[in-house]
Amino acid sequence: MTKSELIHQLENTIENIPDFPKPGIQFKDITPIFLNPKLYEEVIANLADFSRGKVDAVCGIESRGYLFGIAIAVALEVPFILIRKKGKLPPPFVGEKYDLEYGSAEIEMRTGQIKPGQRILVHDDLLATGGTTEAAAKLVEKQGAKVSQFSFLIGLKDLDGEKRLQQFNAPVHSILEY
């Protein structure tokens, strides 16, 4: 399947839910992708092709980043490392706080799962403002590894998440951009 065919099929599959979870938000429901195993395989192939030979491990951001991240890691034959919300992992772990629209949050990763010098792909389903992804990249750097790539199913261009990630000097790949 060509990239344009993949984009067309995804656009016809992903459901747009207006005013969810609050008024003014256009929620992109990706769950219909999982009803079509062939489409899911094509998504993984596209995301894996972006990273093939360029990463030593994949870090997925909780929880929707796991839906594709694990399969990307399997396709690349590299380890998959969980990035979780605060309080979900046993010690030892390292954490990173980040700001939200109202308040702050923190994500964590177990220490010792990333090796110094490794090239890491940070993956999530969606890039919006980039706050969570930026915090994930900082977690990777705290352990002496290098974020070599970011990948997403969807990128929301108007929210400038890519600009926030420029500090890491790593390519950003989104299959769909809105």
Image (cartoon, helix red, strand yellow):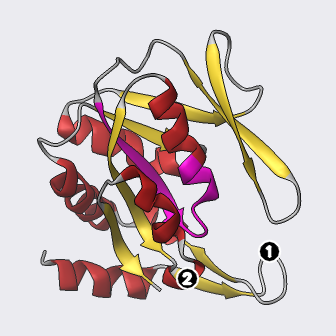
Badge 2: how crowded within 10 Å, few (<14), some, or many (20+)? some
Q: Residues within 10 Å of mark 1 (few under 14, many from 20)?
A: few
From the top left corner, tell me how far across and down residue 7 is, in percent: 30, 82
Residue at 58% x, 73% y is 29
The amino acid at mark 2 is Glu
Q: Quadrant of residue 13?
A: bottom left
177 vs 68, nearest the viewer: 177
User: Where's the N terminus, which quadrant?
Assistant: bottom left
| Separation of marks 2 and 1 at Cα, in angstroms | 14 Å
| Residue 119 in view, yes or no | yes
Count how many numbered circles sit on residues in the image: 2
| Picture quadrant of residue 36 | bottom left
CB of mark 2 within 8 Å of CB of mark 1? Answer: no
Which label's residue is closer to the chain start, 2 or 1?
A: 2
Residue at disc 2, secondary structure: strand
Q: To which residue does mark 2 refer?
A: 15
Instruction: Relative to 163, say whether 142 is above or below.
Output: above
- From the viewer's perspective, is the residue at label 2 or at label 1 nearer? 1
Does the segment drawn in magenta span residue 128?
Answer: yes
Task: Look at the picture and state if 54 lies above or below 160.
Answer: above
Q: In the displayed image of the protein, which residue is found farthest to the front? A: 167
Residue at position x 48%, y 54% from top?
Answer: 124
x, y percentage for residue 147?
36, 41
Question: Is residue 61 visible in this depiction of the protein?
Answer: no
Label ID, residue 21 = 1
Magenta-tinted stretch: 119-134
**Type of the residue with mark 1:** Pro
